[in-house]
Amino acid sequence: MIKKDKIKERKFSKFNCGKPDYLMDRRLYKIKEWRNALRGQPAFILGNGPGILDYDMAILDSFFTIGINRIFDIFDPTILFWQDIELWNDHWKKIIKLDAIKVAEEDADPEKICVNFRRLRKKPYLSGFPGLVSGLGNSGLLAVQFAFALGCDPLILIGMDCNYRDNNTDFYGRNKYHKTKTLDWCKRSLRWMKNNEKLNIINCSDNDYWPKCDLNEIVKRYKNKGLGKNLYKRIFRGLAFISIKDPIQSGPYKFKRINNCKTKRQKRNRY
């Protein structure tokens, strides 16, 4: 585990990847201040179901995306989101090279270099806080709660199939950690999402809980609301914020840049 007082001095004792950019997420971002940071922004939540291969992920480059687990094999999202330590153990060399903001459950970040959320092992509910989610057995369920707490609307599901295709559990083939109950947990999570009136869901996945929408049409509908990954990062760092008058019909968002590093908010967050 990387100790806080050693984080600047430690270079490449374990990670052999050039510049130590992987150390920056935990230092730059404060998840407790992310509540409603993206109010009214569409969030594309990318699961690992086989159906995600039906789309060209490049059309989402300018949008806010939350990629779950091994989505980095085909796309580098705005936020990479995971809850299982196995993902880190098997793929940390790939993860630390991603441009995505890395958001993981506390126990799934052994090196303590990512932005961490806390997961309650209980029935799912919308806490309204990005750093607090609840539920069992499905990362997509947690990602939806996380996106809702950010203020995102609508939530567009891609690759959250809860179905197999050609005996493949995921877009990359068969998941070696797939359990007999994994599919049941996934379907239970989708039922919870559908029955929650607070969630505005648009489905672009191969599941049976909503009519399937064409992703290309959804992208056209919200084409003026993609701000680009760099601006999303500035928002999460507190260097910019979104000002919305009419989040549905106003077109491009207005945002205010904060370039003075001596603002009260940044003074409080400085190390």
Image: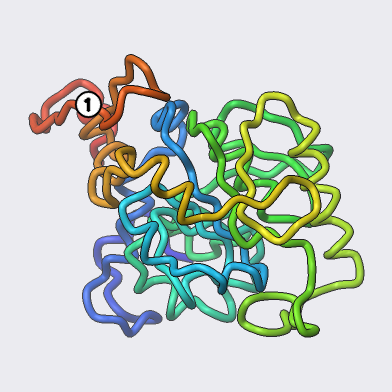
Can residue 197 be seen in this snapshot? yes
Q: Position of residue 232 (x, y in %)?
A: 30, 43
In the visual, does 183 lie left or right of 173? Answer: right
User: Which residue sits furthest left?
Assistant: 260
In the visual, does 159 lie left or right of 222? Answer: right
Q: Nearer the viewer, residue 217 or 103?
A: 217
Residue 215 drawn above or below residue 156: below
In the visual, does 259 lie left or right of 165? Answer: left
Query: Callout 1: few (<14), some (14-19), or many (20+) C-alpha neighbours within 10 Å?
Result: few
Q: Nearer the viewer, residue 203 or 39?
A: 203
In the visual, does 173 lie left or right of 110? Answer: right
Residue at 62% from the left image edge and 62% from the top image edge: 159
Q: Nearer the viewer, residue 245 or 84?
A: 245
Q: Position of residue 40 (x, y in %)?
A: 43, 28
Residue at 80% from the left image edge and 56% from the top image edge: 186
Q: Which quadrant holds the C terminus?
A: top left
Q: Position of residue 52 (x, y in %)?
A: 58, 68
Residue at 72% from the left image edge and 80% from the top image edge: 175
Residue 73 drawn above or below residue 150: below
Residue at 76% from the left image edge and 37% from the top image edge: 194
Residue 27 drawn above or below residue 199: below
Can residue 33 be seen in this snapshot? no
Circle 1: residue type: Lys
Helix, strand or loop under label 1: strand
Residue of label 1: 254
Q: Position of residue 264 (x, y in %)?
A: 20, 21
Q: Nearer the viewer, residue 153 or 25?
A: 153
